Image: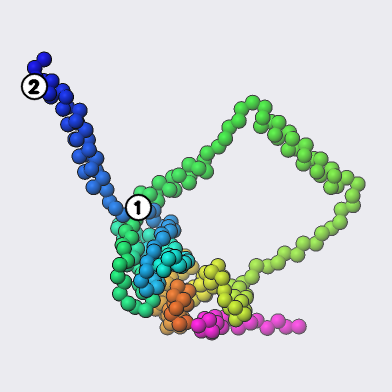
Amino acid sequence: MTAASSSFRRWLPWGLAAVVALVAAWWFLQEDDSLKVPLGVEQAAIITYGGPTLVVKPFRYGVAVNVRIAQVTGQDGLKVYDVRYLVNREGEHDLTEYLMADDGAALSGLPSFKIQGDPKLSKELEARVKETEDIGIQVWGHYRATLWGLGVFWIAWLLLLIFWRRPQKPVAVIAQPPLTSAEQLRQLLAELEQGALTAEQKARLEMLLLRSWREGLVPAEAPMAEVLAAIARGERTGEALGRLQRWLHRPGSGVADTEIAGIIRQHLPAPVAVRP
């Protein structure tokens, strides 16, 4: 064996390791630094910022990402925002482009939060749900038959205890009709006048008002984006929708509860008089 051959064999593993390291580095550099999320599924992000208070920009028709701030807490002089977002279109988006300062000041030092809307992840999510629903557990032997027998015996014994030599008393069941949209709006109006509504009640109020406003503007099966656009263009509903959105999503916008109560009263149908 020559000296050149011995030196080549000694440095060959190091050369291969260097090539593997270069390929791995190139691969990681090619990876996108944005977070891939499925379309139509709400996600959560935590943003810590020490500047002015962040709020969500006013709603715009056709936005790629719907953003809302679920909770704001303080920590060491900073504010921690629990931001919830839902991606509507594929491609790369920056979550911070949908945020603004409550006083309109420029945001400095707010890092970008890039997200990648990926329709492939949405399809894979649906497939995983279907696979989960199709999964079954098979137990061989007499275990299943024993369980069925015990279940039938327990039900028969329970029925025997309930009905053996006991007179059956007729029970009158009065079915309460479901509340109409107008009745639900009146209940929420009463709650609003007595005190602040909860987040769930505010969401219910928004849904009922949108359902009431869309009548006569768009078909019932129209998508939400088309419904909001039609309501925003309406002479009777456009200004009311703007106040409602600011009241719901911008607590510091100055829209008072009394204004929202007035909007509810304007769009409530007149109560039907019941004849004696």
Q: Distance between the residues labelled 1 and 2?
A: 51 Å
Residue 157 place in picture, x, y as percent: 81, 40
Above or below: residue 16 compared with residue 71: above
Q: Which residue lies furthest to the front in this view?
A: 76
Q: Residue at left 52%, top 40%?
A: 134
Q: Nearer the viewer, residue 224 or 187?
A: 187
Secondary element at image label 1: strand
Under mark 1, the amino acid is Lys
* Left or right, residue 68 beside residue 155: left
For image coordinates 81% across by 44% down, the residue present is 159
Q: Quadrant of residue 114?
A: bottom left
Colour mode of the rendering = rainbow
The answer to whether residue 27 is left or right of residue 132 is left
Marks 1 and 2 in Cβ contact (< 8 Å): no
> Mark 2 falls on what kind of element?
helix
Alpha-carbon neighbours of circle 2 within 10 Å: few (<14), some, or many (≥20)? few
Q: Measuring from the top left, give residue 5's x and y in whole percent.
A: 11, 20
Instruction: Residue 256: tell me if it is visible.
Output: yes
Name the residue beneath numbered marker 1.
36
From the image, tell me which residue sits under label 2. Answer: 4
Q: Can you say whether 102 is above or below 113 in the image? A: below
Instruction: Check the picture and name the quadrant holding the N terminus.
Output: top left
Amino acid beneath label 2: Ala
